[in-house]
Structure formats: structure tokens, C-alpha cells
Image: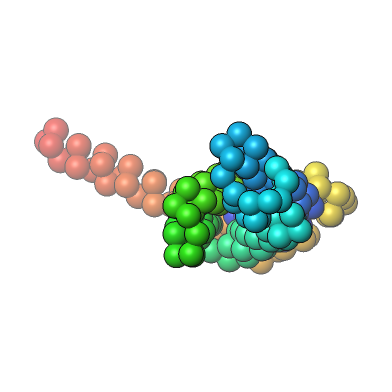
Amino acid sequence: MNENGSERAVNVSRLWSGGLATAVVAALVIFAGTLVVRGVFGVPVLAPEDAGYLGDAGTVGYALVAGLVALIATALLYMLLLSAPRALSFFGWIMGLATAIAAFTPFTQGAELSSQVFTGLVNLICGIAIVSLLRGVGRSAIISRVPSTPDERPGRALRHEGVLPDVNQQEYDPARYRAMEEDAEYDEARARAQLQKAEEERARRDV
């Protein structure tokens, strides 16, 4: 488990298990799309016309590339979660643009229009599946590190994950603990000053 700043931690095992599952889904989307397009519509996509309903070795390679893209997207999501603000928004934009490129790329190839349309559609569905699944995986892999009370500071999250079972927050990171206490004291002092100022103004108005 790795943390980003003082507010975000990432459950690595959950993230990558979700990424592997997404890779399997991406590969199956390619096979399912090929089966539907070739078997139902009779349009030769991702393989020559004389190949079977599931295509040929080229179709297998295409499915493996889709799975690899899902793993690369998982690595990108991991990097963004560790270092970028609004990581899921950046991930959505990056992968959305990549999906659009994949959907329009078949139209630059020398093939029949029907084949170009269905290949682009398969690419689009595969990209949408990867983006939607990994965004959900990313949200589930984020562990909030923002404490709501002193007893719920990040040390408890670490103990809950089994990383530091017998170490409290102050012992684990005393500098950060002091900084959070100073921030709380500053907020309290500021609130008292504002309250006192409001009382003084009210007293002047009453006079």
C-alpha cells in the first residue's frame, strides 16, 4: 500500500487484481465483437473473409493487445493515483481520447466501409469497457487518509490494513501529527477571534 501526500492511500493488490480482470474482459470483448459481427452480420473484421466466426491468429493477437492495453491503463491509473490531483478525471480524459483514436483509426485503413465501421465499433466498446471498469477499480482502491476525529487518524487505517498493527499515528509520524494539531489549534484560535470580533461589533451597535 502506498500513500499520496497525507490524504490518499492506494490498495495495490485490489488495484492490480481489478486491472487483470479488466484485461480479461477487454480480450473477451474483442472475441465477442468478432463473433457477432462475422457470425451475425457477415462482415469480415479483424481477419480475412475466409476465416471462421472467431477470426484467426490475427484476432487472437488483437485480443491480446486489448488485454495489454488494459494493463498499461492500470499502470497509468496507479501512477495518477499516487501523484496527480483529480486522478480519476485525468485518467478518464486520457483514456477517452485514446479510445476515440482507436475508434477512428480503422477508417484510415484500406478496407470496405462496413468492415471499418464495425472494427471501429468494437474498438469503441472495448475502450469504454476498460475506462468504466478501471475508474470503478480506482475508486475502490483509494483508501481515505483524512481523519474525522483524533482517534480516526491514519494510524488506525494502517493498523486496519495490517501494516502497523501496534503503532499509533503519533509514533508512526510525529511530525505530521504535530502539524495536524497545530492546524486544528490555528482554526480554533481563528474561530475564537472571529466570535470575539462579532461580539464587539454587536456591543458597539447596542451602545
Please tell me which residue is depicted at 63% across the width and 51% down the height of the picture.
49
Residue farthest toward the front in the current orientation of the protein: 50
From the top left corner, tell me how far across and down residue 118 is, in percent.
52, 46
Instruction: Specify whether residue 94 is in view.
Output: no
From the top left corner, tell me how far across and down residue 205 is, in percent.
13, 37
Q: In front here: 35 or 205?
A: 35
Q: Is residue 159 left or right of residue 36?
A: right
Task: Identify the coloring.
Answer: rainbow
Q: In front here: 34 or 38?
A: 38
Please tell me which residue is depicted at 86% across the width and 49% down the height of the picture.
162
Please tell me which residue is depicted at 15% across the width and 40% down the height of the picture.
204
**On screen, 94 above or below 123?**
below
User: Which image quadrant is residue 73 in?
Assistant: bottom right
Instruction: Specify whether residue 40 is in view.
Output: yes
How many numbered marks does the figure carry? Answer: 0
Q: In front here: 128 or 93?
A: 128
From the top left corner, tell me how far across and down residue 207 is, in percent.
11, 36
Please tell me which residue is depicted at 56% across the width and 37% down the height of the picture.
41
User: Which image quadrant is residue 150 in?
Assistant: top right
From the top left corner, tell me how far across and down residue 48 is, in percent.
65, 56
Q: Is residue 25 left or right of residue 185?
A: right
Question: Image quadrant for the N terminus?
Answer: bottom right
